[in-house]
Image (cartoon, rainbow, N blue to C red):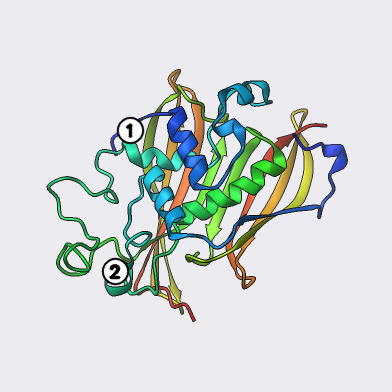
Amino acid sequence: MAKITFPVEATHIMMFARAIGDTNPVYHDAEAAKKSEAGGVIAPPSFAQAVAQFDPEYYLRPKPGQKWFGSGKTPSGVEGKPSSSGGLHAEQHYEYVRPLRPGDVLTVETKPGKTWERESKRAGKLTFRERVTEYRDQKGELVMVARGVGVTTERPVDQG
Amino acid sequence: MALKASALKVGDTHSERVVENLSRTQIVQYAGVSGDYNPLHTDEVYTTQVAGYPSVFAHGMLTMGLTSKMLTNYVGDGRLTKFGVRFTNQVWPGDTLDATATVEAVRDEGGQRFVDLKLSTTNQDGKEVVSGSATARIDP
C-alpha cells in the first residue's frame, strides 16, 4: 500500500474534538494549551483515524465522476449489493510514542495483518481482517502504531 | 491534572456520561471530520432499504472518541501510551452512553509509573457497546 502524507492541522483537530463533544481547551485554544502540561495544542487519542482524508483512493468518500453506493434517485447508486455493505469495524488499538501536534507532517504506511473467521449466531460467518498502520513524523521517528480489525458479516447483525 | 500513583488503588473507577441522546447530526459531524462517509452512518434510505439495518448507526470510531473523552479527562492530556477497544454492539441515534475506566494495576517500568485501566462504555439499557483497555503515564 502506498505511503500517505498526513499533515496535522489545528483546524482539523478543533473540528475532530467538536465531533466527539470534547470541549477540552488543549484541542482548540492555543494560548490555554501552551500553559497546560501538554505545552501546546495536541490531537485527541483517536484523531489519527482522520488520515482517511489524505488517502486519495479512500473508498468511503464519494469521488467526482464515480458512482456512489449511497442513495440518490434510488436507494443505492450502484447495481447489486455493494461490496462494502457488510463491513464493520470490530477493534481498534493504538500505541503512542507521543501525542500528535499541529505542524506534524506524518508519513503513514498500512500493512495487512492476520485474517481469521468465526461463526456468529447474530450475523452468520464473520471474516476478520487486521491492518497495522505506522505513523512517522517529519524526522522519520515513529510516533504511533494503530492496529485495526475490520469484520465482514454474512448478513446484517441481528438486533434481537 | 495528572493522576498520582500514590492516590490510586486497584478497583478505583471513573465514569462520565459521554453523550446524551446521540443526534444524527453529531454522526454527520464525525463523518465529515474523519472522512469516513460510509452511508451506513448518515444515509437512512440506503441503510434501511439496501443494507438491511433498522436505522443509521454511529461509526465505531465515534464511540471510541466519546470513550477517549472520559479517559483523557481522567488521566490527563498527552499521557496515554496505549488505548484499545472492541466494538461489541452498535450505537444508534438517540443512545445515551456512559464510559467507565477501572484501575487494574499501578506499576513501575524503568522508573516511570503507569496505570493500566479496563474500559467499558454502556448504553441506556446497560448494554456494553465498547470494551477496552488503556495504559497511561502517571505521577509518583
Name the one closer to the observer, A141 or A12: A12
Q: Is residue B12 left or right of residue A79?
A: right
- The answer to whether A107 is drawn above or below residue A59 in the figure is above
**Chain that bears disc 1:** A
- The answer to whether B93 is drawn above or below residue A9 in the figure is below
Give residue B45's mark: 2
- The answer to whether B51 is drawn above or below residue B139 in the figure is below
* Quadrant position of the N terminus of chain B in the picture: top right
Q: How many marks?
A: 2
Cβ–Cβ under 8 Å for marks 2 and 1: no
Residue that appears at 61% across and 37% down: A24
Mark 2 burial class by Cα count in 10 Å: few <14, some 14-19, many 20+: some
Q: Quadrant of residue A87?
A: bottom left
Q: Is residue A55 left or right of residue B90?
A: left
Residue that appears at 49% across and 81% down: A160
Residue that appears at 27% across and 71% down: B50
Instruction: Provide residue A111's location: percent of width, then percent of height.
Output: 37, 42
Q: Is residue A89 left or right of residue A64?
A: right
The residue at the far left in this view is A65
Q: Secondary structure at mark 1?
A: strand
The residue at the far top in this view is A139
Q: Which residue is mark 1?
A: A4
The residue at the far bottom in this view is A160
CA separation, marks 2 and 1?
33 Å
**Chain that bears disc 2:** B
Mark 2 against mark 1, which lies toward the viewer?
A: 2
* Quadrant position of the C terminus of chain B in the picture: top right
Give residue A159's mark: none
